[in-house]
Image (cartoon, rainbow, N blue to C red):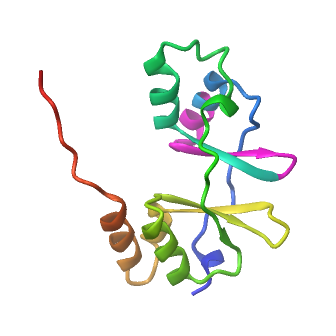
Amino acid sequence: MEISNLMSTDVVSVAPAASLDSVAQVMREYDVGAVPVVDEGQLVGIVTDRDIVVRAVADSRETWLCRVGDVMSTDVQTCGLGADLEDVLQAMADYQCRRMPILDDAGMLVGMVSLADLTRDEDGDGASFVLGEVSEPVHFVIE
């Protein structure tokens, strides 16, 4: 199955110069935990709610002054629009990512595949496979 049948195409994105406050508002409005960062149509990174917390809030940075480009992840794994489902599943598992940006032949962002999208697969096995590969046991330290 081609991934274009499962991916979300109404992807909201932000620019690297956007403030963390504004991207957090986008996350709240669209109920997402990750937003692609696009500069002149090209994907340059992705910012997650975890990026904001770990790279800004935990360091007591002023989020209204801090820019997305300061905290975003730039080593973003992607798949092409023509990729089939098995390739995307394997890439998500290999790179332990819960969301995979999908690019067209020109490198433009055209969609995202998330674990939620994978649950719409006919057999639903894709979501289980990826979740099992990206989830790691959590070890809590109680002080």
**Tag count in the figure?**
0
Query: In the rendered view, does 81 fall on the left or right side of 142?
Result: right
Q: Is residue 134 left or right of residue 40?
A: left
Residue lying at the far front of the rendered structure: 75
Is 25 above or below relative to 111?
A: above
Would residue 99 appear left or right of 68 to someone viewing this image? left
Left or right: 116, with 75 as reference point: left
Which residue is depicted at the point 76% across and 46% down? 38
Query: Residue 17 in the image: x percent, y percent?
Result: 77, 29
List x then y, in percent, for residue 83. Answer: 64, 80
Q: Residue furthest bottom?
A: 1
Q: Which residues are magenta?
A: 25-41
Quadrant containing the N terminus is bottom right
Q: Residue 39 in magenta?
A: yes
Residue sitting at x 68%, y 25%: 67
- The answer to which of 49 and 71 lies nearer the viewer is 71
Q: Is residue 132 above or below residue 36?
A: below
Determine which quarter of the picture holds residue 14: top right
Q: Position of residue 140 (x, y in %)?
A: 17, 36
Q: Tell me the quarter of the image containing the C terminus.
A: top left
Q: Is residue 123 magenta?
A: no
Residue placed at 87% from the left, 47% from the top? 40
Q: Identify the residue at horizontal 54%, vertical 75% (top origin).
A: 88
* Percent coordinates x, y for residue 142 in the rendering: 12, 26
